Image: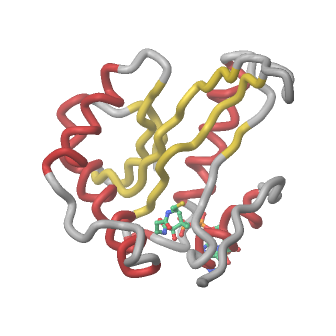
Amino acid sequence: MEVRLAKKEELDRVNELRKQVNDIHVAGKPEVFKPGFCRELQEYIYVIWEDPDQDIAVAVQDGVICGFAILHHVIRPENPFMKERDFLDIDEFCVDEAYRRQGVATALVEFAKEYAREKGLHRVELNMWEFNQGALAFYEAAGFTTYRRYMEMDV
Ligand SMILES: CC(C)(COP(=O)(O)OP(=O)(O)OC[C@H]1O[C@@H](n2cnc3c(N)ncnc32)[C@H](O)[C@@H]1OP(=O)(O)O)[C@@H](O)C(=O)NCCC(=O)NCCS
């Protein structure tokens, strides 16, 4: 398996994987996420493609794109509360259902770590929805730890 940056002609396939993530979010948090994968969401991959601060990594196995990650270099300026923060954010992440539990996501995270180091960054972040316990188990297995929480209650 190879992990590399995507080619523009591969973005339709990346969108098939983005739809899988969207469907998981709709099923897990239907009060938040809109069902379907509308044209605007589909076209957003080209906005990412054009953004100099973002890259799209893909995992390729036997010529098939089986996973992807959006790698986003984020710089948050200093403010009265916080120091400047400069890190790599993994904005979207998915391995095709048919290719899970074969180490694809692990290879994508290794690629992201190396990509960050090459940019002189020393921190990789991501955020996730709490219902997605499979993703949490993976992220923890990959070495991520929780440093902040969002909490809610119904009233
Ligand atoms: C989460 C996800 C990316 C993991 O991808 P993957 O390629 O299957 O992960 P790996 O094979 O590299 O897993 C490495 C280890 O992580 C842990 N792990 C991965 N998926 C797991 C799961 N669903 N439940 C429990 N542990 C899991 C295991 O320890 C695994 O090692 P093992 O297979 O030897 O037991 C994948 O399940 C996925 O794309 N899910 C749907 C999309 C999604 O939720 N994306 C994240 C949105 S924030």
Residue at 28% from the left image edge and 38% from the top image edge? 45
Determine if residue 98 is in view: no
* Left or right relative to 18: residue 25: right
Q: Which residue is nearer to you in this view: 17 or 29?
A: 29
Colouring mode (rainbow / by chain / secondary structure / one colour): secondary structure
Of all residues, the one furthest to the front in this rendering is 155
User: Quarter holding the C terminus?
Assistant: bottom right
Query: How many marks on residues?
Result: 0
Spot occupied by residue 133 in the image (x, y as percentages of width and height): 62, 78
Residue at 82% from the left image edge and 57% from the top image edge? 145
Residue at 52% from the left image edge and 35% from the top image edge? 71
* Left or right relative to 34: residue 95: right
Q: Is residue 155 above or below residue 58?
A: below
Residue 36 picture quarter: bottom left
Q: Which residue is nearer to you in this view: 76 or 112?
A: 76
Spot occupied by residue 151 in the image (x, y as percentages of width and height): 71, 69
Q: Is residue 27 above or below residue 72?
A: below
Q: Is residue 122 above or below residue 100?
A: above
Determine if residue 136 is in view: yes
Spot occupied by residue 90 in the image (x, y as percentages of width and height): 57, 43
Of all residues, the one furthest to the bottom in this rendering is 155
* Left or right relative to 153: residue 3: left
Q: Dividing the image into four equal quarters, which quarter contains ligand 1?
A: bottom right
Spot occupied by residue 87 in the image (x, y as percentages of width and height): 71, 28
